[in-house]
Amino acid sequence: MNYNTEIILESERLLFRQHVPEDLEAYCAMEQDPDVRRYVGDRPRTREEAEHRFKGSLKPITNRLAMWATVLKSKGNYIGRCGIYPHFDHDGGIIDGEASLGLYIAADYWGRGFATEAGQAFIKFGFGELKLNRIVTMVQVGNDASVRVLEKLGFVLTETEIGKRSFYHFELKPNKNYN
Ligand SMILES: CC(C)(COP(=O)(O)OP(=O)(O)OC[C@H]1O[C@@H](n2cnc3c(N)ncnc32)[C@H](O)[C@@H]1OP(=O)(O)O)[C@@H](O)C(=O)NCCC(=O)NCCS
C-alpha cells in the first residue's frame, strides 16, 4: 500500500503529515511512556493497545481536521502528533465552524517550544485557512505544562469541570492576526 507523505502544514522547525508505518516505534514509545500519558488517559498503554491505535492512525485522512504525525525537520524523525480535529457536542454531532486542538510531544523533546510552535501553526491554519469561529481544548487539572502552552497561545479559560479527573476547558477566538 502506498502512503501519502504529503506535507499538510509546516512551521519553522516542524512538518506535519499523515502517519506512515515507519512511525510505529516512536508512536508506541510515546503511548507507553507514563510521563506522556500522565494527564491524558491516566495510564500508559500496553504495546498491544498502542499498536492497535497506531493501525487506526494509518487510515487515509480525508478531512483536514485531524491529528497529524509531527516531524522534526532537522533530523526527519517523528516527535509526536498535533492538529485540530472536529469538536463534538454532547450528542456526538460535529459543531460546524469549531475545532479542538491536540498537542502530544515525546518527552525527549519537551521544553523546546515545539508544542507552542505546532499550536501556532494549527491556529493560523484553523482561523486563516479554514475560517473557524472558535478553537477549543480540554486539559486535565495538574497538567501545568499544557496550561502554560495554552496561555502562550492566547487561550482563555471558560470552565473548570470537577470530577474524578477534573478538566479545564479553554477557547480561542479568531483575531485580525489570523486573517
Ligand atoms: C504539554 C506538552 C504538549 C508541552 O510540550 P512542549 O513542547 O514541552 O511545550 P513548550 O516547550 O512549547 O512549552 C512548555 C511550557 O511549559 C512550561 N512548563 C513545563 N513544565 C511545567 C510545569 N510543570 N509547570 C508549569 N510550567 C511548565 C515550560 O517552561 C514552557 O513555558 P515557557 O516557554 O514559558 O518556559 C507536552 O508536555 C506533552 O506532550 N505532554 C504529554 C501529552 C499532553 O499532556 N498533551 C496535552 C494534552 S491537553
Image (cartoon, helix red, strand yellow):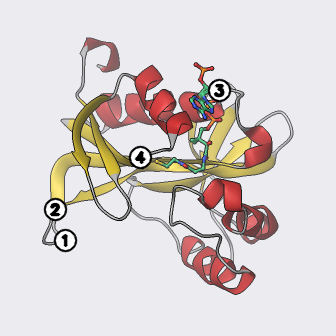
Q: Indicate the secondary structure of the residue bearing disc 4.
A: loop
Type of residue at label 4? Val
Residue 100 spot, x, y in % from top left? 34, 49
CA separation in Å, label 4 and label 2: 21 Å
- Most extreme residue toward the top is 176
Expressed as whole percent of the image width and height from the top left, the position of residue 41 reads 50, 66
User: Would you name the residue on which mark 2 appears?
Assistant: 89
Query: CB atoms at circles 3 and 1 under 8 Å apart?
Result: no
- Residue located at (32% from left, 44% from top): 168
Image: 8 above or below 37: above
Q: Earlier in the sequence, mark 3 or mark 1?
A: 1
Mark-to-mark CA distance, 3 and 2:
31 Å
Mark 4 Cα shell of 10 Å, populated few (<14), some (14-19), many (≥20): some
Q: Amino acid at mark 1?
A: Gly
Q: Position of residue 118 (x, y in %)?
A: 55, 35
Disc 4 versus disc 2: nearer the observer: 4
* Marks 4, 1: nearer the viewer: 4
Q: Label 3 vs label 4: CA separation?
A: 21 Å
Residue picked out by circle 1: 92
Residue at 74%, 72% (x, y): give it: 21
For label 2, the SS is loop
Respond yes or no on whether mark 1 lies under 8 Å from ligand 1: no
Residue linked to disc 3: 113
Q: Nearer the viewer, mark 3 or mark 4?
A: 4
SS type, badge 1: loop
If you read the primary sequence from the N terminus, does the residue marked by circle 4 or circle 2 appear first? Answer: 2
Discs 4, 1 touching: Cβ within 8 Å: no
Mark 3 residue's CB less than 8 Å from ligand 1? yes
| As drawn, 130 above or below 30 | above
If the image is split into quadrants, where does the C terminus sit? Answer: top left
**Image disc number at residue 141:** 4
